[in-house]
Amino acid sequence: MLKRNIKQLLVVGFVGFTLVGCSSTPEPTEGAVDRNQIINDLPEQVDQDISEVKQSKIKTLAEQKAELLAIVKREVVYFDFDQSDLASQFYSTIKANADYMALEPTATVTIKGYCDERGTREYNIALGERRANSVQRALIAEGVSPSRIEVVSYGEENPAVDGHNEAAWSKNRRATFSY
């Protein structure tokens, strides 16, 4: 039994010395480079590359804004006769305007409401305002601050299309966006 305990003690001791010897950290050899030194010695080209990537992202954002602005400037919301409720087909127009305003936080928009020539001047001014307000509420629902939206009604003034028929009238019942 004593012999067995001594044998176990020698084996454990041998394993312990072996592990201690393996755990030592070797001294750096000549020519080895410190990791921090590598980072510090990166060429200036990397900084230039990063700068170019940032510039391309900025250009891309500027291009996105320009494209979106071009789209929203030509978009018009049309209304049915004597109506101020938004038709579902125009929600993409509202969304595009809200997206533009999200990309351009200093932008303000004037929503101009129009009517066809039928009805009294007073009635058409009120209807044009209701139409513009309907568009305003939709923009607010999309997250645009009310302080960035102005509403104007032109009633039957400034028709988009001259004419005294349904084809002309349908183009004049509208709300437009002005940035």
Image (spheres, rainbow, N blue to C red):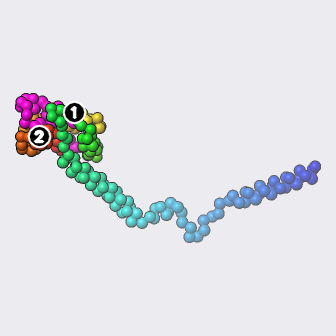
The residue drawn where x is 88% and y is 54% is: 7
Element carrying mark 2? helix
As measured in the structure, the alpha-carbon distance from the residue carrying label 2 to the one carrying label 1 is 19 Å
**Camera-side mark, 2 or 1:** 2
* Position in image of residue 27 (x %, y %): 63, 64
In the orientation shown, which residue stands out farthest toward the bottom?
Answer: 31
Give amino acid for label 2.
Answer: Glu
* Left or right relative to 68: residue 35: right
Q: Residue 166 carries which label?
A: 2
The quarter holding residue 51 reads: bottom left
Residue 124 forms part of the magenta stretch = yes
Q: In which quarter of the image is the C terminus?
A: top left
Q: Which of marks 2 and 1 is nearer the N terminus?
A: 1
Q: Are marks 2 and 1 in contact (CB under 8 Å)?
A: no
Give amino acid for label 1.
Answer: Asp
Please report the bounds of the magenta region as a residue range.
Answer: 106-135
Q: Which mark is residue 115?
A: none
Q: Write down the residue under mark 1.
A: 85
The quarter holding residue 155 reads: top left
* Left or right relative to 127: residue 104: right
